[in-house]
């Protein structure tokens, strides 16, 4: 069935309220997948999961200007509304929310939601203000949709950590559901930004997932965080077009660095091994979420 | 009827959900009055209004540590739970939420809601971090209670402006209802902090409301913001125990200074004339919200 498309907050709330009142309690759950559009199979996996778990699934498509830095790709961020709506239809989406910038930010923005600590490292360090923009727009969207569950892909693992912590700290009554990374057959993590890559870059972009694939083995050999970082950088450097921005192992979801030389295999709890690598102007990220004590067994969902 | 007392978020949400489901839509509205306790007739006026306008009224009593500065009166802030519950009962309150600090801030606080611009002047200038603490706890409480309407007293007019703007910017689906200042018979604005005043200070504290009472007359005479500020300070200085922190006229609700010398009577829109005055260690605030073009007629509620 074709989803209903709404562009205003008033319309969206009306649709959701009418859904909630039409169903008996317990069958009236609302699932929500916030995106910036140009949807791929990663988004589709979130949408399908939401459709399975909820009576109503809401997809939002909004390229949020306040999470882009001054030299980032806001203006050329890829868009394809028609294709997105078709994909949404095939994934059981009921409502697509397509607000304008004016609808989301009708007056000068004076209110900001800031999450400290978990935003200090990784993308938080290289993209100042980025996570303020993410936390603020997600708080807005969660207040607009008031979903029971919201689904986020773990490719943006730090984003999942930020949103989860924000929802806890602000008592937002939505369950934040982290979902596994979806990859191309050759291992490249799906991303709307992959379209920027030329053929040569696309080939060398494989270095991210290939390096991450070696992590369990390195951990089993007893490396610490500092050595793991070096090994990852050396591995990725074999692709001459790759410029590593970071290659770090941090505790998850607190995103704190473990002691540099303590063997990671002795650390209890989840560990995030995360990469950001530039190919020309295109910045790719990828990661693995691991429980090092479980002998390098990869874990795809985080609690 | 005696209100139900709950101390945990889980219990509170259960009570509110059970109320909402027991009523047909349209009769199930929830009103909310967030306070720091030690209730007086000002709070009572908010509670009675909420009881009149809603099917369920929730009162929260929480002395929020994060809105107090390091040298402020957090430790000695007055408390009287028993008397507060009795007053709540007489005002038709259904639920009293009395959370512990641990219940409200169970982990290190990394998420902050910041409202800029409207917090630059008045109490925002003299109490750094105060309105971050207010905005953050109010965002939390609104997410916990999810009320249809929340009632705030205009004695804290800047707080009303901050909360109203935050709710708009973050799309919080609660109507923020500003309510008029309640005064003692002699004019002193009610405040939990009035108990700190000794007899002499109590007498001289009248200088705030007396000075504000002259504002319409001064405006009618054609004063600008700078002259009004001087007149207020001079008037209050007649009480030797009074130390004026600020005496300002600002646009409302944006809280911007008008041109210093433009006659206030020529300005369209609401104008806030606000005072903060210290008596010993006790800091009192008071204000009048005016529409100067309406020849000094005082207006008690703001939209």
Image (cartoon, coloured by chain):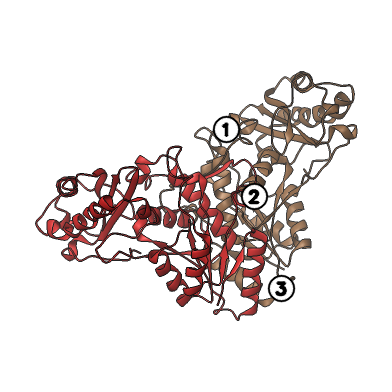
Chain colours: A brown, B red
Q: Secondary structure at mark 2?
A: helix
Along the viewing direction, whichever of B129 and A227 lies nearer the viewer: B129
**Picture layout, residue A64 above or below residue B145:** above
- According to the picture, the residue beneath numbered tag 2 turns out to be A168
If you read the primary sequence from the N terminus, does the residue marked by circle 2 or circle 3 appear first? 3
Q: Name the residue that disc number 3 marks.
A: A25
Q: Secondary structure at mark 3?
A: loop
Residues at marks 3 and 1, CA–CA distance in whole angstroms: 42 Å
Q: Label 3 near label 2: C-beta < 8 Å? A: no
Q: Are marks 1 and 2 in contact (CB under 8 Å)?
A: no
The residue labelled by disc 1 is A127
State the quadrant of the N terminus of chain B. bottom right
Closest to the observer, B241 or A212: B241
The residue mark sitting in front, 1 or 2, is 2
Q: Is residue B115 visible?
A: no
Chain letter for mark 2, please: A
Percent from the top left, x then y, of residue B75?
A: 49, 44
Left or right, A19 with respect to A137, comes to right
Horizontal and vertical percent for residue B91? 47, 73
B4 horizontally vs B175: left or right: right
């Amino acid at each position: 069935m074709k989803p209903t498309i709404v562009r205003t907050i008033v319309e969206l709330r009306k649709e959701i309220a009418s859904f909630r009142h039409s169903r008996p309690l317990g069958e009236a759950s609302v699932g929500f997948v916030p995106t910036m559009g140009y949807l791929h199979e990663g988004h589709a996996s979130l949408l399908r999961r939401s459709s399975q778990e909820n009576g109503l699934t809401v997809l939002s498509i909004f390229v949020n200007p306040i999470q882009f830095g001054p030299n980032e790709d806001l203006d050329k961020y890829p868009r394809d509304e028609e294709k997105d709506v078709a994909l949404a239809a095939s994934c059981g989406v009921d409502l697509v929310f397509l607000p304008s910038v004016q609808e989301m930010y009708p007056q000068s923005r004076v209110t900001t939601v800031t999450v400290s600590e978990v935003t200090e490292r990784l993308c938080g360090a290289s993209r100042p203000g980025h996570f303020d923009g993410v936390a603020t727009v997600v708080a807005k969207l969660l207040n607009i949709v008031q979903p029971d569950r919201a689904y986020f892909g773990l490719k943006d693992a730090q984003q999942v950590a930020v949103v989860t912590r924000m929802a806890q700290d602000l008592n937002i009554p939505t369950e934040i559901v982290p979902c596994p990374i979806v990859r191309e057959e050759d291992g490249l993590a799906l991303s709307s930004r992959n379209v920027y890559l030329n053929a040569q870059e696309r080939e060398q972009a494989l270095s991210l997932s290939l390096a991450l694939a070696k992590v369990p083995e390195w951990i089993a050999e007893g490396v610490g965080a500092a050595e793991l970082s070096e090994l990852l950088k050396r591995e990725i450097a074999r692709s001459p077009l790759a410029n590593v921005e970071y290659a770090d192992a941090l505790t998850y979801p607190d995103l704190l660095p473990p002691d540099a030389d303590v063997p990671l295999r002795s650390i209890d709890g989840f560990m995030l091994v995360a990469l950001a690598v530039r190919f020309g102007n295109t910045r790719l990220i990828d990661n693995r979420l691991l429980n090092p004590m479980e002998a390098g067994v990869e874990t795809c969902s985080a609690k």
